[in-house]
Image (cartoon, rainbow, N blue to C red):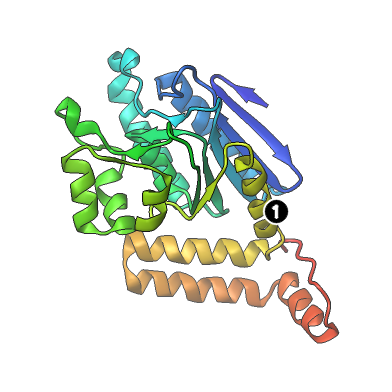
Amino acid sequence: MDYENIKLEKKDHIGIITIDHPPVNAWNLATMEAFASAVEAVEKDREIRVVIITGAGEKCFSAGFDVKDAANSHKISPKGREVWKTIDCFPKPVIAAINGYALGGGLELAMCCHFRMMVDSPEAMLGLTELNLGIIPGWGGTQRLPRLVGRAKALDMMLFSKTVDAQEALNIGLIDQISTPAKLMTDALAFAAKLSERPPLAVSCVLKAVAAGDYEGLDRGLEVEIEGSAVVGKSQDRKEGFAAFLEKRKPIFKGV
């Protein structure tokens, strides 16, 4: 299914959202609204258990805000904050397959994903470079970057508009895996396939509990964990998991 500047594919239990807005996959209003619709579609699709977000082309995941659509910035930025938070709290695992450089809002989107894979390429750099323009990261970067790489490193990157390559990004915890350009989607799909075999209800409950703790504090996170335990305790997946363990076979989870 295609939206304006966004492509949505489904392979088995995996949804793939591709940002396709040449030349740098930047976010204008039409692209942002289309992306929001694609995200809503994969959330509602019960067959989709894992989501991959990537960029079209070989050089760029996303360069962030599209300055050519500055007239709509008052609509784009609030929508970006809203949708990025939706990804951060998504009830299905989301993998960022970073196929090139990711700057500004592009990196802010990648940081919202639960897992990040990145190509090892001279053109592939990550950074929140907004201060070069006299502005600041405004789609969650000031909060999410320190949580991933630590306060001092995040401030160093933001205040000096520094970019990092794949190896440094891995070393500081900004990404989880390095891949070659030729193998990025193969690796992402393989990892997504493994995730899709995990019990969907339990996966969703874990993601919801972690998000609640991040956004609402430890006590609320513990409450959501208790709620999740009650949900999975009554599920067919729990019965299947216990039965498979006793029968020494691989469980087949159906998300019910």
> Quarter of the image containing the C terminus?
bottom right
Give the image location of residue 158, x and y in percent: 21, 42
**Residue found at the very far front of the displayed protein:** 122
Image height of 247 relative to 78, above or below = below
* Quadrant of residue 57 within the rendered picture: top right
Instruction: Name the element at disc 1.
Output: helix
Give the image location of residue 69, x and y in percent: 34, 15
Residue 82 visible here? no
Q: Nearer the viewer, residue 107 or 78?
A: 107
Q: From the viewer's perspective, tell me whether residue 98 is left or right of residue 221.
A: right
Q: Which residue is mark 1?
A: 193
Image height of 223 relative to 141, above or below = below
Q: Nearer the viewer, residue 98 or 44?
A: 98
> Quarter of the image containing the N terminus?
top right
Give the image location of residue 116, x and y in percent: 49, 49
Residue 98 visible here? yes
Q: Identify the residue shown where x is 78% and y is 74%.
A: 240
Q: Identify the residue shown where x is 29% and y is 22%.
A: 73
Image height of 193 relative to 74, above or below = below
Q: From the viewer's perspective, tell me whether residue 133 is left or right of residue 18.
A: left
Give the image location of residue 143, x and y in percent: 27, 51
Image height of 17 relative to 242, above or below = above
Residue kind at label 1, given as amino acid type: Ala
Q: Identify the residue shown where x is 76% and y is 45%.
A: 12
